[in-house]
Image (cartoon, coloured by chain):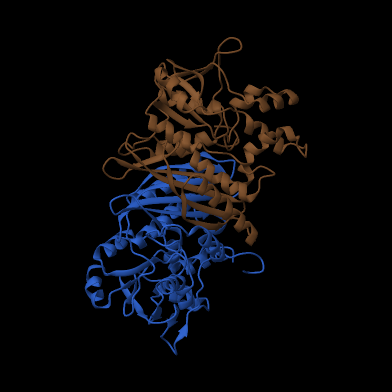
Chain colours: A blue, B brown
Amino acid sequence: MSKTGLTEREIIGIFKRRFDSGPKLPLGFDDDVAAFPMSQGRLVVLKTDMLVGSTDVPPGMTLRQAARKSVVSTVSDFAAKGVQPRGLLVSLGLPPPVRLSSVKEIALGLKGGASEYGCRILGGDTSETDDFVIDCIGFGFAESGGILRRDGARLGDVVAVTGEFGKTSAGLRILFGNKKPWPRRFSKLVYSVLHPVARLQTGLQLARSGLVSSSIDSSDGLAWSLQEIARLSDVNIVLEEIPVAQEVKDFAKENGLVSEELALFGGEEYELVLTIKKDRFVSLRRKIPSLRRIGNVESGPGDVIARFGGKPRKVEPRGYEHFT
Amino acid sequence: MSKTGLTEREIIGIFKRRFDSGPKLPLGFDDDVAAFPMSQGRLVVLKTDMLVGSTDVPPGMTLRQAARKSVVSTVSDFAAKGVQPRGLLVSLGLPPPVRLSSVKEIALGLKGGASEYGCRILGGDTSETDDFVIDCIGFGFAESGGILRRDGARLGDVVAVTGEFGKTSAGLRILFGNKKPWPRRFSKLVYSVLHPVARLQTGLQLARSGLVSSSIDSSDGLAWSLQEIARLSDVNIVLEEIPVAQEVKDFAKENGLVSEELALFGGEEYELVLTIKKDRFVSLRRKIPSLRRIGNVESGPGDVIARFGGKPRKVEPRGYEHFT
């Protein structure tokens, strides 16, 4: 517990201890989504994700982009589990006075996001708040055993990701910085923040392959995601490289930053982080070319170890977290 | 549209127009819950309800009571539809610093509410906000056609409710007033606000009876609920009495208020408002003694008419609403 108050992980820990009792559920309280048995081996899969104006909407992001982002953030958790979201509910908290133009922008963003990912907005709730809040709730259906979990990594598996990292870290620094307009060569970095993309089709394809032993999205940062798989699967993850986007390397160099740090400790980057059966990785990558091997699963107490550029060292289990 | 900004109904109207397209869903966008087809004639039923500290938590309400209230509010919509909620997800927005004691209180309130209504908390999300926010999301399962709707009232039906009204209106006036401590004889009024109860068992029993043509909860006030049934069913509702609790009559008299107004235009009172086949009402009331007849369904353009104490007059379609 920090001196000033609890961190997000500490709060979640308290709820987990209080609520995670009773008959065992298909997925742990720690996983990206919740799942509940429906009938005949089928599950309903649910996720809620709250976007808050003051912490999740950087300067330069429009209401429409923020509303779309709230959908992307929820859909990304379904992507990581390999489950198609079927519908969304949206609880909105809006500071008065609420203008027609704002409501239209929010509606456009939500509807745009929903149709990108083949789901439909079914309802919601509207309240008066001091701060702009969008709680986006998604649901879908899955077969028992058909959900990619966080806790299934096995010794010898390959650790892989679906893209490069660090773009949103760098983009957020640009948006929160004072240099405006930002250099055009960094537009991709800014765009990655304003228009994030959930890897839904890739996640569905990965789930169908049957070759993925564990999966998580990287919305709390690459280091944190690796840490979660290692902790919940009770294995070590050994990193052999960090896929950093070229623009991130350029940005880091220009600003005296370490690009690997931007890639490891960012957040709001919606790639998938996976473990895959070693002898099937090459054939799977033929079907999903965005897959990139970054390391291995080894035995150990749940650590993430960097084994490149010098001697092996532990990667701190830190990531994007509220209340810090 | 008001000069200062949109009202809650106007905002919902805009979303409804934008989102309510595509294949017809089992329930309208206007109903208490959303429903989506699962398989073999079964539906998943979903509801999200956002409680906000500054508008939904009166002075004198503890965090534990507020957390429980957020559950009651969501469960009440399931009660009105005759559907058992099976699980809950909770998105929390908390202003930092977050204390251990606050988190424990919230957890106790949520867990208490969930176990009162036989459902389980499966997961959620935690964010940093300026204002205390609890978004409580419920889900359950129903047979197609097994959900009590808002739009099914038929000519000749009896209009009935499950209890007396006005207690929360009066209780909120006491809590927001300056007289402290409040007179002990009004404790029931205050308690109705701090410890609301959802009529889940009654709602389930009503749904099983097969005799209810329409149903809604009274969380936005009795007048508003009647208005919604009248509007969506395309009928008039004629009120012949308003069931006002005796304590409300006493409170109104002492404070120079009209008790029927407190009963009609209150809110956060979680009774059920129903229409029932006329010739079966008496037998149904034998099984559910809390049922009380308050009027009839007649033909008309969707108005609510008071026909007691003087000449018939239209009841204003006003109720509890955010942004006003």
User: Front-most of A100 and B122?
Assistant: B122
Name the residue rendered at 70%, 36% in the picture.
B187
Which image quarter holds the N terminus of chain A? Answer: bottom right
Which image quarter holds the C terminus of chain A? Answer: bottom right
Name the residue rendered at 22%, 71% in the picture.
A286
Name the residue rendered at 53%, 64% in the picture.
A13
Lateral position of residue B42 relative to residue B266, left or right: left
Query: In the picture shown, does residue B42 fall above or below B64?
Result: above
User: Front-most of A71 and B239?
Assistant: B239
Q: Is residue A91 visible?
A: yes
Please provide percent x and percent y for residue A119: 34, 48
Please provide percent x and percent y for residue B163: 55, 28
Query: In the picture shown, does residue B209 fall above or below A241?
Result: above
* Furthest-top residue in this view: B311
Please provide percent x and percent y for residue A48: 45, 53
User: Front-most of B236 and B18?
Assistant: B236
Q: Is residue B31 visible?
A: no
Q: Quadrant of residue B308?
A: top right
* Furthest-front residue in this view: B286
